Image: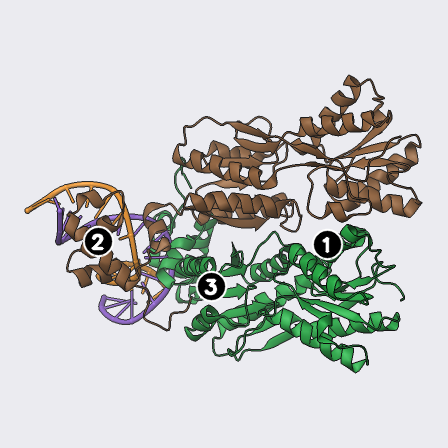
Chain colours: A green, B brown, C orange, D purple
DNA sequence: TTGTACGCGTTATCAG
DNA sequence: CTGATAACGCGTACAA
């Protein structure tokens, strides 16, 4: 940033003011080394530092130490309402640890992702929190092999042992299916998220189990995969589902956006929700309670997901040998107006 | 980030490979200085750089040049759906200019804001895009006086001549009032945003003008200020409005969140919208079309706001002498289901 | 307990 | 056209 004013004071300025060597100042200011310095000197140095308004220069520090007290946050798109709460959670935990986060949006483009991660690494980020993982993800495997501290949020990756923080997808889907079954539904469909994502695969698997466990119809035609975790993809999957099957009375959507896609299709076709068909979402993003009808969904504690992910990463940075733990956060079904008795 | 592998190649590595001095490598790689170097040398250097996978080290570069190709994005809270699209707009324009943005959330806490901005500055950000401005804002005045390139989004600050990008609030409010008047409403209220923000003040002023111009009731009691730009503050303002006046048939909300607060109160009190009262929002945040009822609102081109703000900042960084221009982006009324004839 | 010397990777400024 | 040198701000062996 431009400095019309005298530029920020450095260790040297303090040293001159106090009449000692810069090294002494450095030591006096660093909590870890201040015991190597006379108590009185420490006092004088600290006073001078405060008087001059000294702020350590993180750039010089990074260059010298190859650390940055900074981590990269790799997300698909901050515009997706799912991510801001996670990001806030991450940042509050990072802040508590003296770190800060650098956000990048990949738009789910692997090339872009690679470029952005390279740029983050060149900025010396000490670790990465990644929300874009796919089941197959060579880049992440590379990074993990290279020893880059990594935490996954909302996703798992096959074949590598990376810590991750996710919602308890299986429990959420079970609760949703049980809720619908309790309402008398027997032919429940699942609009699954992309099966290339661990979340999409896990929820679909949980759906099949839940349906079977309850003795409901488990014909393959009742599960339709969406190409994206988006409203549009949800709508087109909903269309093909409804074109193929007229007997469906309830839908478990892979997430809230997909559920919104259903709403669109219901609007197009004059289907009454929940009168004709019930829908359950997943994630509980903001303002769902004000939809028409208010969406029944599975609440995920996004802020907590972020907090835990950041803590885990910080732990991993502190002790690179620490074995990868994974964390499953509890979810809860929020019953609103989009589900009704059959 | 930890480097188990051989650490990234530097200018020196290239120099050794090619058999020239690091200075020469630096010059050959820098587009601005490569004409000071023999064409053949340039060729060999570039090839070696590519072969070794050279990536310039931004940290060293920053330390040396006091620049960072980085700007700070100061927003209240990324969790507010208003900001993600702006942020994306900003980042796409920054990226096009070879810059990137560092996001901080102030939570509208001035102390926190100061701390965060200090930290951004110590990271050598070359400028700031600020979305947290209040009408009185000593910190911004300081920064501006210190010559820090600054652009305001969605806000103006009194007394200092800083470039800013805002929506055409007056036009938006006028359109909203005219729409309601056309529907036959004559006692229209305004739930104003905080009058300490320029946006809140501008919209309230525009409301008074619009109402007067159309010959509608302009009693002061029809304008109620909300303490925050939030759903809760909107709800409590709506309550006091409805407690005081039973004759109101339409409300122009300061923004969409305030409008959502109205929805909450309508729910509490069994008021039918739009049957009993019409509501217009402002901003057109996502998913408003799926509310019950779909919210009529003023659409603001948030992505464009971000893009223009970033361009303006980049211009200001390039040429600090450039006079502050301000930009008013056109808005449009989106009529949905929350407004109906009287 | 304090100071000296050096290096992190880069660019600006001279000298050749 | 190219090379040598210093400097950005800081931390750390090593010496005193």
Question: Can residue A21 be seen?
Answer: no
- Up/down of B60 relative to B66, above or below: below
Camera-side residue of A143 and B286: B286
* Residue highlighted by disc 2: B25
Quadrant of the rendered image containing residue A340: bottom right
Q: How far across and down, in percent of the image, does residue B234 sit?
A: 79, 41
Please check whether the numbered discs 1 and 3 fall on a single chain. yes
* Count of labels in the image: 3
> Dot 3 surroundings within 10 Å: few (below 14), some, or many (20 or more)?
few
Give the CA separation, mark 1 to mark 3.
Answer: 43 Å
Task: Judge left or right: residue A254 versus residue A106.
Answer: right
Say which element carries label 3.
loop
- Up/down of B204 relative to A142, above or below: above
* Residue highlighted by disc 1: A286
Task: Judge left or right: residue A330 versus residue A322.
Answer: right
Give the CA separation, mark 2 to mark 1.
Answer: 53 Å
Residue positioned 45% across, 47% down in the render: B95
Give the CA separation, mark 2 to mark 3.
Answer: 40 Å
Say which element carries label 1.
loop
Please check whether the numbered discs 2 and 3 fall on a single chain. no
The N terminus of chain A appears in which quarter of the rendering? Answer: top left
Q: Which mark is residue A211?
A: none
Q: Which mark is residue A31?
A: 3
- Chain letter of mark 1 equals A
- Chain letter of mark 3 equals A
Q: How far across and down, in percent of the image, does residue B65 sit?
A: 33, 46
Say which element carries label 2.
helix
């Amino acid at each position: 940033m431009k400095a019309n004013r005298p530029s920020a004071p450095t260790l040297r300025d303090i040293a001159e003011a106090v009449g000692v060597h810069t090294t002494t100042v450095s030591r006096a200011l660093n909590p870890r080394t201040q015991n190597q310095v006379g108590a009185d000197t420490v006092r004088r140095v600290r006073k001078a530092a405060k008087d001059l308004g000294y702020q350590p220069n993180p750039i010089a520090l990074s260059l010298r130490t190859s650390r940055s007290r900074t981590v990269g946050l790799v997300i698909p798109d901050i515009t997706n309402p799912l991510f801001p709460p996670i990001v806030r959670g991450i940042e509050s935990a990072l802040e508590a640890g003296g770190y800060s986060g650098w956000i990048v949006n990949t738009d789910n483009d692997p090339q872009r992702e690679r470029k952005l991660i390279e740029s983050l690494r060149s900025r010396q980020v000490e670790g990465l929190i990644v929300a874009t993982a796919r089941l197959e993800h060579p880049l992440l495997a590379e990074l993990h092999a290279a020893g880059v501290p990594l935490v996954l949020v909302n996703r798992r990756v096959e074949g590598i042992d990376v810590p991750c923080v996710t919602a308890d997808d299986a429990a959420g889907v079970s609760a949703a299916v049980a809720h619908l079954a309790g309402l008398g539904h027997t032919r429940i469909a699942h609009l699954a998220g992309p099966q290339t994502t661990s979340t999409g695969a896990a929820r679909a698997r949980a759906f099949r189990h839940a349906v079977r466990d309850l003795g409901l119809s488990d014909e393959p035609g009742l599960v339709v995969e969406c190409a994206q975790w988006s409203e549009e993809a949800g709508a087109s999957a909903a269309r093909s589902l409804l074109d193929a099957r007229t007997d469906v009375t309830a839908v478990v959507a892979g997430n809230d956006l997909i559920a919104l896609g259903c709403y669109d299709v219901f609007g197009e076709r004059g289907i009454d929700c929940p009168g004709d068909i019930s829908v359950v979402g997943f994630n509980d993003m903001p303002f769902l309670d004000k939809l028409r009808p208010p969406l029944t969904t599975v609440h995920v504690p996004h802020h907590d997901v972020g907090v835990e992910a950041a803590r885990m990463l910080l732990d991993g940075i502190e002790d690179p040998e620490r074995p990868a733990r994974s964390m499953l956060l509890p979810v809860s079904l929020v019953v609103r107006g989009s589900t009704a008795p059959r």
